[in-house]
Image: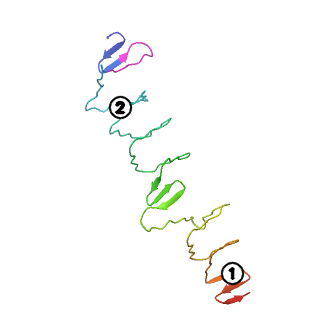
Amino acid sequence: STGDILIDDNFITTTLSNSNLELRANGTGDVIVPSNDVVFEQDLTVNGNTDLDDTIIVGDVTHTGDTTQTGNIDLTGNLNIDGEVTVSSAAQFENVRIEGNTVQTTDSNSDLELAASGSGSVIVPNNDVAVTGNLAVDGTLSVGAISSSGTIQANNFTTGDILIDDNFITT
């Protein structure tokens, strides 16, 4: 025993009730555990900054508080987020980039598809869609009202009761 510390076999124990055991190096020295794994069977609390180089964690990590990340994160598996994601810069997902209020493809001449699953629809509720340039529709275009200051071309037009096809109007 050396006062408040008991060294017995391969155990170092404090002798005062509820007292901390501190490992400190002198000056700018480090506490080093060379060529050995350190195993914690209870919680590990780090006060202040720490560098964890080449750290492998097996199991779950629960983090409470804010995280500041510098550098890249490589993730294998899924990332599940319960809450909002705030991005202060652009976000790149494979060939799709979201920056500000613009969604665009990044591969040259690649299409951007908005597709619903199954019989679902892509819906833009309560807003106007402005098309600057040409709008090509393969299939049927159903609209409640349409206004144009230019030319509208189609193989035929129908209102359900009236059909305009080529130069024929039929009811």
Residue bearing mark 1: 158
Disc number at residue 39? 2
Q: Earlier in the sequence, mark 2 or mark 1?
A: 2
The location of residue 53, given as percent across then percent down, is 33, 37
User: How would you rate the neighbour count of disc 2 (Cα within 10 Å): few for under 14, some for 14-19, many for 20 or more?
Assistant: few
At 69% from the left and 81% from the top, the residue drawn is 158
Residue 51, placed above or below residue 14: below
Q: Is residue 31 left or right of residue 147?
A: left
In the rendered image, the quadrant that contains the N terminus is top left
Look at the image and give the residue range highlighted in magenta: 13-24
* Residue 89 within the magenta-colored segment of the rendering: no
Q: Secondary structure at mark 2?
A: loop
The location of residue 151, given as percent across then percent down, is 62, 78
User: How would you rate the neighbour count of disc 1 (Cα within 10 Å): few for under 14, some for 14-19, many for 20 or more?
Assistant: few
Q: Secondary structure at mark 1?
A: strand
- Cα distance, mark 2 to mark 1? 76 Å
Disc number at residue 86? none
Q: Residue furthest bottom?
A: 168
